[in-house]
Amino acid sequence: MMLQRRLLALTRGARVRLAATAALGLAATGTYIVQGLLTARAVDQILRTGSWSSILDSLGGIAACIVLRIALVWLREVSAVEVASAVKQMLRTRLFNRLLLLGPGYLETKRTGAVQATVVDSVEALEGYMGYYLPQVCIALCAPALIVSGLFALDPVVGALTLGCVLVAPFGPTLYDWLLGDYGRRHWQAYSRLGAQFLDSMQGMTTLKAFNASGRRGLTLQREATDLYRATMAQMSLSLVGSGIAGLALSAGTALAVGVGALHLAEGSLNIPGLLTILFLSAECFRPLADLNMYWHLGYRGISASPAIFELLEAQPMVSEPADSASVGSESGSLAVAFENVTFAYTDGERPALGGLSFEVGPGETVALVGRSGAGKSTVVSLLFRFFDPQSGRITLAGREIREYSLESLRSLIAVVPQETYLFHGTVAENLRFGRRDATPAQLEAAARTANAHDFIAEMPEGYQTIVGERGLKLSGGQRQRIAIARALLKDAPLLILDEATSSVDAANEAQIQQALERLRSGRTTLVIAHRLSTVVNADHIVVLEQGQAVQAGRHRDLLLQPGAYARLVTAQQGTL
């Protein structure tokens, strides 16, 4: 019940439409009631007079009820779809905004397929609950109450029996809702696992084929699919018990009402018109409950799926916005960066990723962070963007601690060229405009020329309107990197981060990319994350990291003369410098 109250809260903003759907359903049910009364009257007149002409007005009324009901049912269906669509749209917007607020830190702890199942499939499963089940609850509460009142007036015993069956039909299954809820959660967990495994398999298809592992992966998917099948059948089996209870109550209610009415007719306490009215009204009394039972199965998919939705909505971001954010107006030029005794550990880390790290990057300087994999270089970037906050120490930009900036303001000050450039499915121009959404075609071309990207873009079939494909797979690694550089140029932020920007390209592309990077760095404070040491020879300062700590710092020439971590890195790269 608590879960259903929370689901009802999701209808905020669509409750007028929800009420309209319920009202249309009630009106359609009203046509059934009127039709039942007219039918009882017509049968009574036939029995008494034997003349068909005496029931023409009743038949006309019945025909009018049928036509009106067709129109009302059509309007109700349209309204139900509108309600469900409105709720799903609002909910998906909330979930997407929540994911943006939670940021990469949250997504690193979740499987992509599981998050996709929550945002797409779980929300879709709410359609039956929002559009049909909730309006039918209102109908099932109001219509039977009206009919039972009429039956009480005709025959109190029949009214009491009908009321008892009316109460058993919807409330009987709730006695084991807790058990069905557990089975429903197992079903959606199995569904999410299968979705996550399938998405992983599709994204890693090349690797599976290269290692002849597709058969083994297929067996894993088969096991997950079997688990989903078993969870689905278990939920369905238990759900059918509820259908049986409800169906028995509905059938028994009509039979008991008519049977008792017939006895009272034989005793003389009820006349034939009264018995006919009981016959047709008792059937109509249980019609809304039968529909509720049907929609309950449809709606329960949404109930089973909703825990994952609420888990995401209630997830807390790892970083929070400041109460009073600092202005970024004064940070228009290059700016200084400082890490002051920063310690940070990931949630499941056995040791800190950074342990008391301190270094500075002066305005307009280029500082390189080098070290082996796992030394903490990428963690520095994540902390600068405030995907996480350090457990101790502080990070400053332009003399202000970064926690003083709003997240949007902070990130507007930083441009990044990542090691693996992510391009969205869309055109070259659309991907460039992530750097500056209002950039004109001329500005796009200027940035691309500076990044040595214009020539290959111009050779594409549709130039800047060419679709790059999912993750930019239609482009080479070097082309993607040059688009990333052009994107950073368009952003024109005072702090530039080059995160292994040339590590995944060949020597021919590296020369062009290095030229573009030199242009990009001009006039900006630059932090270079490097594994290939040939890219940091001309840095103003080099900081060598080991196990999250700065173990050496200085210029390239000076560090080469000192025995230590930097010299070992240079030696390991076999004299490439």
Image (tube, helix red, strand yellow):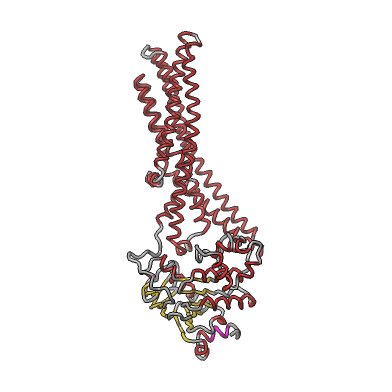
Number of disc labels: 0
Q: Quadrant of residue 485?
A: bottom right
Find residue 275 and report its horizontal and vertical position in percent.
42, 17
Q: Nearer the viewer, residue 84 or 280?
A: 84
* Image quadrant in which the N terminus is located: top left
Q: Is residue 570 magenta?
A: yes
Residue 373 visible in the shown view: yes
Q: Is residue 414 magenta?
A: no
Q: Main secondary structure of the magenta part?
A: helix
Find residue 233 and report its horizontal and vertical position in percent.
53, 43
Find residue 227 and report its horizontal and vertical position in percent.
55, 50
Q: Is residue 224 above or below residue 357?
A: above
Find residue 299 and report its horizontal and vertical position in percent.
46, 41
Residue 204 visible in the shown view: no
Q: Quadrant of residue 575?
A: bottom right
Q: Is residue 9 above or below residue 321?
A: above
Q: Is residue 333 above or below residue 89?
A: below
The magenta-colored residue range is 567-572
Q: Residue at x 47, y 20 (%)?
A: 61
Q: Residue at x 40, y 61 (%)?
A: 317
Looking at this rendering, what residue extends furthest in the left direction?
A: 324
